Structure formats: structure tokens, C-alpha cells
Amino acid sequence: MRILIVEDEAKFADHIKQALVEIGYVVDIARDGVEGKNMALEGSYDLMLLDVMLPGVDGFGVLQELRERRGFPIILLTARDSVEDRVMGLNMGADDYVIKPVALPELLARVQALLRRGHAQDLAVLRLGDLQLDLVKHRATRSGTRLDLSAQDFKLLALFLRRQGQVQSRTVVAEQIWDMNFDCDSNVVDVAVRRLRQKIDDPFPVKLLHTVRGVGYVMETRA
């Protein structure tokens, strides 16, 4: 699942992103309403966390436009706690309205509850060929064989499976998994991918994790 955070408070946004990435989500951040609206319209997201008080276009403005054009769940985040504001946000199409400051476990629970609605099984298990990654049981199998994955292996595999068929650059992988700026002289991504490949591909005849030379990696089935 891919989540978009639209929040101009950098520390708060980064804190939420780190927590979501740690439990297997792919997360992008926009810092103002215009950027958030454009990313939501151009990208493929499963849920948005949307601050109300944003520079450029406020959250209500973003919500109004997106509700006419996109259908993913939207959680409003705001310090505006009046009944009128809450009613307005929900009437405009928000799926939830969370008052700041919010406890992180509560926010994560609200995110997961929304994403479970109507298609829990699809969200719980990621699949490609005979490879399965169960996000709830935190278990990976291939051809029925249990795979011994570390926490980092699990996060990396979830990223590739959520974006299967899409080439992921080393920069994107480093940002999503380690929340770090990519150093072209570092081989941390290559080492991690090599270790993951040894577990999910090497023991099996059909390879799923492929290198795109000079670009990055992609997980897909190939003839």
C-alpha cells in the first residue's frame, strides 16, 4: 500500500512516515496543498493523510477537488477541533478527522482500519507468482516454503511487491527503507538486495527480483 502525507510541519510528517514505513507501507510526503493535490492526481495512492492548515491551497480545498476526481480514503489532520470544522470535513468527503496532537498508535490504527475496509485479504497478503508475503502474520513463503527474513528483508520485499513491475532506483529504495539520502559511493542498497535475493530467488528456478543495469531493481515475473 502506498500512502501520501500532505503536511507542512516537516518533523511531524517525517515522524509519521517513519512509523508507517516500519510496518510495511510505502510513503511519500508533500509539503503544501498544491504539491499534495498534484501528487495525488498524478500518482497511485491507497490513502492520504491531509493536514487542513496548509500553505497554498488548504486541506479543505484539496479535499474538495480530490473527492471529485479520486476515490482513495482521506484522513484529515488538524488542530481545528470545533464541531463545525469536523462536520464540514466529513460532509466534504473525508473518511476520518483526527485532531492534533494525536498519539501515533491511534493514528496508525485509524490508517489500518480504513485500509482494511472491504478488502482486508487483498491488503494483508502480497503475491507474485509462488511468492507470498503475509503482512499480518509477518511471514513470507515461496512454493509453500517458509522464508527466513530479517525485519529489513521484510520491509524491502514489501516495497518491491507493492511496486511490482515498476523499476525502483537505489535512491528510492534508500529513502523508503532507511530514510536516508543516497550516497552514490555507498553499496548499502546493493548489499541488502543481494541478501534478499539469496533468500527469495537463489533456491528457486524462477527468478523474481531483477537488476535493471544502471537504474535499479524491479520485481516481476519474466518469460
Image (cartoon, rainbow, N blue to C red):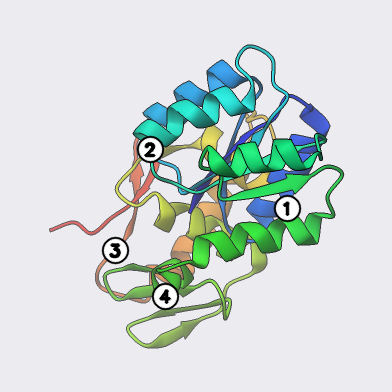
Q: Amino acid at mark 4?
A: Gln
Query: Mark 1 or mark 2: which is in front?
Result: 2
Residue picked out by circle 2: 70
Residue 187 in percent (x, y) is at: 60, 40
- Which comes before the other along the chain, label 4 or label 1? 1
- Which comes before the other along the chain, label 1 or label 2? 1
Which of the 4 quarters of the picture holds residue 83?
top right
Whether residue 203 is situated above or below residue 188 in the rendered picture: below
Mark 4: few, some, or many residues within 10 Å (few <14, many ≥20)?
A: few
Residue picked out by circle 3: 207
Tell me whether the residue at label 4 lies in contact with that at label 2, contact meaning CB atoms closer than 8 angstroms: no
Q: Amino acid at mark 2?
A: Arg
Mark 1: few, some, or many residues within 10 Å (few <14, many ≥20)?
A: some
Tell me whether the residue at label 2 lies in contact with that at label 3, contact meaning CB atoms closer than 8 angstroms: no
The structure residue drawn at horizontal position 18% and vertical position 56%, both measured from the top left corner, is 222
Query: Mark 4 or mark 2: which is in front?
Result: 2
Residue picked out by circle 4: 121
- Which comes before the other along the chain, label 4 or label 3? 4
Query: Mark 4 or mark 3: which is in front?
Result: 4
The structure residue drawn at horizontal position 56% and vertical position 50%, both measured from the top left corner, is 95
- Callout 3: helix, strand or loop? loop
- Marks 4 and 2, how far apart in space? 23 Å
- Callout 1: helix, strand or loop? helix
Q: Amino acid at mark 1?
A: Ala
Q: Residue 19 shows which numbered tag?
A: 1
> Which is nearer the eye, 11 or 195?
11
Q: Residue 196 shows which numbered tag?
A: none
- Callout 2: helix, strand or loop? loop
How many numbered markers are drawn? 4
